[in-house]
Image: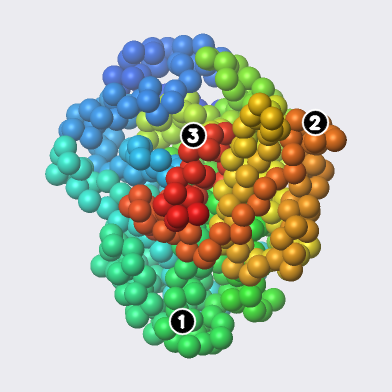
Amino acid sequence: MKKRIHDIDLFRKYPHEVQEELFRNLVSTAKHTEWGKKYGYSDIKSVKEFQERVPISTYEDLFPYIDRVMKGEQNLLWPSTIEWFAKSSGTTNARSKFIPVSPESLEDCHYKGGKDMLSIYVNLYPDTKLFTGKGLSIGGSHHPSEHNSKISCGDVSAVIMQNLPVWAEAMRTPPLKVALMDKWEEKIEKMVEVTVLENVTSLSGVPTWTYVLLKRILEVTGKQNILEVWPNLELFTHGAVAFGPYRQLFRDIIPTNNMHYLEVYNASEGFFGIQDQRGTEDEMLLMLDYGVYYEFIPMDQFEEEQPQTLTLDQVELGKNYALVISTNAGLWRYKIGDTIRFTSISPYRIKISGRTKHFINAFGEEVIVENAEVAVTKACEETGAVISNFTAAPIYIESEKRGGHEWLIEFEKQPDNLERFTQVLDDTLREVNSDYDAKRQKDIALLQPVVHAVPQGTFMNWLSKKGKLGGQNKIPRLSNTREYLEEIMEVNGL
């Protein structure tokens, strides 16, 4: 672990050199693939040439190659044999994406990220007792491809768990046969049964589903808080959704100042960031030696067909960028769908600011997920509320009505006053987003938000009806249409 901290310090100190070397290795390795031959990888000598020759890709652009690999062809996007695919919905829509997972990406990205997370944590907290117990992780499930029985598909967590070395499997709970169950309700019950008997010292997973498990554990055991079940619990490693709105939920259920929370940025496409400082909450070190080459699209150019991308040495603090990656699994100049902004450039640290498709801009207000999460967190703090989930969408302008935003919020603990909650939400959005503030001036274009406190279980019920319980599935925080919001209300009879 100490040796690895030294390596991390090297890419902190020499970020551009590390990325340049990695870029050359990726292009060289893939030069004899079908993709590499198509774009002349053999004689690409610079990043500039790479950017000029190779188009920026969406999933739809790469799908014809991915589909062929899933049916058994190899050496199309990457030379190694691809036998695993991470199934990603990204959101809760019906279309699933299948992301290739090469042996290199599994070992040098996903596993390396997990090991680095432990290395960084131990470096931050050298007195840890983490390894005296087990780590509890909530995985998804996997299954053979319908096209090819030699190919397996599943949540990236399931792909990782299934391929863990024996020593790593011995350090975690529940056992694989439980962790990889595909029926969510049955899995939760079995996880409770198995894990309450263990000495759990750490948790990892998506905050939403982890909280569902912890609540069920308290219901079954009759305990008041999780420390009565696992007195040595000290770490929750979380990712996939912003933790701010969930922070109070976990403080209530794990009431100790000795509990540590570490944010990671891991996705089906790769492992990208790890919180490397105490007390920085959602600020993460961009991991530069994981077989991922990074480019960045300024968000004001995102809608262009082939926008100019920036390399790491060209980015600026505080600006929103769409993330573009080239990876050791054959994703080339791939728009991952996330937006980030840099909080530091020496070393490079980032915050996830949202999704390229998750925003509200019906009236030129350009509200992004980060704005919404900051506002919800502030409104909860001011009114004593605790939330479990939320979504928001525009209210369109009609002939006699002005527009606005409509919010569905599921409270774990109701605010002392819903009107005040709404006011703080609105005020905070105006503070953090000047475009929203301008549209709210004297209600000229936007009225104050309409907030509905929906019954507990509303969002889970919707996910269940869509067959999306568990795994990496998430509630879309913001949408520029009313599709999700109206569907949630209809399913729940609201």
Tag shown at residue 92: none
- Check the image and report above or below for 375 versus 82: below
Q: Name the residue under label 3.
A: 336
Image quadrant in which you'd find residue 381? bottom right
Residue at left 50%, top 54%? Answer: 494
Q: Mark 2 points at which residue?
A: 444
Please give left or right for residue 153 compared with residue 218 in the image. Answer: left
In the image, residue 201 lies at what x, y percent? 51, 76
Marked residue nearer the N-terminal end (1 or 3): 1
Residue at disc 2, secondary structure:
loop
Callout 1 touching callout 3 (CB < 8 Å): no
Q: Name the residue under label 1.
A: 219
- Check the image and report above or below for 250 versus 150: below
Please tell me whether mark 1 or mark 3 is closer to you in this view.
Answer: 1
Question: Disc 1 to disc 3, how far (Cα)?
Answer: 38 Å
Residue type beneath disc 1: Glu
Residue at left 38%, top 77%? Answer: 192
Please give left or right for residue 109 compared with residue 432 in the image. Answer: left
In the image, residue 283 lies at what x, y percent? 67, 50
Residue type beneath disc 2: Ile
Residue type beneath disc 3: Ile
* Of the pair 154 and 423, the residue shown nearer to us: 423
* Of the pair 44 and 419, the residue shown nearer to us: 419
Q: Which residue lies furthest to the front in this view?
A: 400
Please give left or right for residue 178 compared with residue 296 in the image. Answer: left
